[in-house]
Image (cartoon, helix red, strand yellow):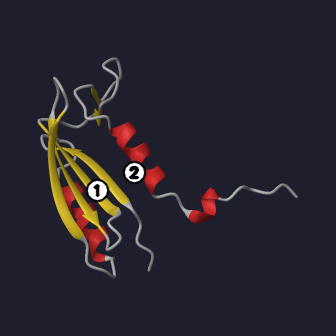
Amino acid sequence: RRLVPTIVFHGNRDTTVHPRNGDQVIAQSRATTMTDLQTTVQHGRVPGGHAYSRTLHAGASGQTILEHWVIHGAGHAWSGGSPTGSYTDPQGPDAAREFLRFFLEHRHAQAARPVSSS
């Protein structure tokens, strides 16, 4: 089986989708691993915004495979979104930036190869 790198963002005050769903996504992904993962938790706060907990699950190489962000005080919204958007929370952290960083760190080798035109 191939381990699929997984990142989850969830507000701990989401009353639309229970925050436990994020926990379950990470637990299911972790259950498919054939190796032990080292877990660390980081805590931070966006200046003038939300506090968050970021749980990292890394393989033997040290690369994070699973990443779970819990945004303290956030509800059902896109974290870090524009204040003019619907279902956005500009108090961050910036989910779009973190998703991009995460997926660039986990580029699929086949997707990284140039496509030939024949």
Q: Which residue matches tag 1?
A: 67
Q: Quadrant of the N terminus?
A: bottom left
Residue nearer the viewer, 25 or 30: 30
- Farthest top residue? 84
Query: Seen in the image, is 99 located left or right of residue 12?
Result: right
In percent of width and height, residue 7 lies at: 33, 54
Instruction: Report the residue marked by disc 2.
Output: 102
Residue name at image x 35 percent, y 63 percent? 63
29 or 108, which is in the foreground? Answer: 108
Looking at marks 1 and 2 on the same chain, the residue that comes earlier in the sequence is marked by 1
- The CA distance from mark 1 to mark 2 is 9 Å
Q: Amino acid at mark 2?
A: Phe
Q: Contact (CB < 8 A) between labels 1 and 2?
A: yes
Q: Quadrant of residue 96?
A: top left
Q: Secondary structure at mark 2?
A: helix
**Quarter holding the C terminus?**
bottom right
In the image, 14: left or right of 104? left
Horizontal relation, residue 109 to residue 76: left or right: right
